[in-house]
Image (cartoon, rainbow, N blue to C red):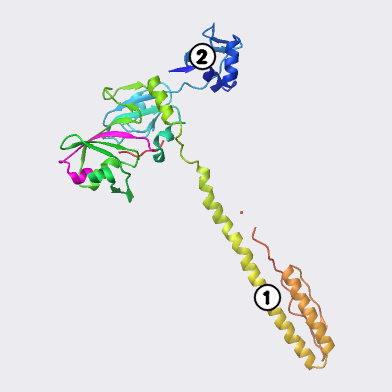
Amino acid sequence: MEIRLNKLICESGLCSRREADKMIEQGRVLVNDRIAEVGSKVYFRDFVKVDGIPLKRREETVYIALNKPPGITCTTDPTERDNVVDFVNYPSRIFNIGRLDKPSEGLLLLTNDGSIVNKILRESNDHEKEYIVTVDKPITAEFAQRMANGVSIMGIMTKKCKFVQETDTRFQITITQGLNRQIRRMCEALGYDVLKLKRTRIMNIRLDKLPSGEWRFLTTEELTTLNDLLVNSVETAAPAKKKAPSKKKTEEPESKAPRKTAARNTYSASSTDNKASKSSTRNSKSGAGTRGDRSFKASKSGSNAGTSGGRTGKSYSKPGGRSGKPSGGSRSGSTGGGSRKPTSGRR
């Protein structure tokens, strides 16, 4: 695949495209030991030097269209017999974009460019995938209508889709979802069994006359159109966004803790005042009014100290030679707060 020289230099991390153009204008860039021209295109196999130093660049991106035959499993797991990576046998690492279940056949894309996988697969981006399906009995008007308007599978109502009947038992369907074995499950829910399922298109990439079991590289025109269609597509949400609920859970006890503590402190303070009041009454009845007043003040002072976190006690003598302590200041309290993780289902 061809790529603009300034883009290749930019993607190496050396400089921006504009700076790369200046280097090319100044004759500082060589392609296969020849001075390059502004606007020229190169292949990844071409040898590029900047100021006499070989350009360090990333691995060449690969985009493959395969006509998957039945019996091949869409996985990169080398322990899986008949996995699609071993079937294609490409010399460098590649992986499939989405899946077709083992009995299904047709168009499957493979690449080493992870940046486009989720952009193609994510349901909210509404990228079309087209299939030709053969079922086990004649298609009725009700079947066609329900397939087009949505069928409940796995507790989910499928999105509306394009449905075109071709023969008594064969139809073309275009969907934007990628639920696991979606089309087969939709047919089963309506009392039909799928005899043959073949994917013929993914977005602008068509299977056309590619023989079963064969693969080809995407053309420059296909890649240009594909990139244009993916400009406004978003990738799958990052796992970091899942932290929000757990953060809320950890903060929840902290927000409740101050209210519980405050309630306990309020109750304790009221109890202390009542005890202090009773003590004062007993003292005044015994004729020690002045001492009763002092004992009440000491008790109230102890209660305030308890709610503010201190520990205060004051002894006094009662008439009759007995000694006692006010009931408010032995506890410590606190009014402050607490202390603080490529998707498409088989069809």
Q: Position of residue 82 (x, y in %)?
A: 31, 30
Q: For this rendering, which residue is in front, 37 or 90? A: 37
- Picture layout, residue 308 above or below residue 158: below
Crowd tier of the residue under label 2, counting other residues whose Cα lies within 10 Å: few below 14, some 14–19, many 20 or above: few
Q: Nearer the viewer, residue 209 or 313?
A: 209
At a point 52% along the width and 20% down the height, the residue shown is 7
Is 267 within the magenta?
Answer: no
Find disc 2 in the rendering and name its residue. 39
Front residue of 180 and 202: 202
Quarter containing the C terminus: top left
Q: Amino acid at mark 1?
A: Ser
| Residue corresponding to mark 1 | 268
Residue name at image x 47 percent, y 21 percent: 60
- Choose between 43 and 79: the one closer to the eye: 43
Element under disc 2 = loop
Q: Is residue 329 visible?
A: no
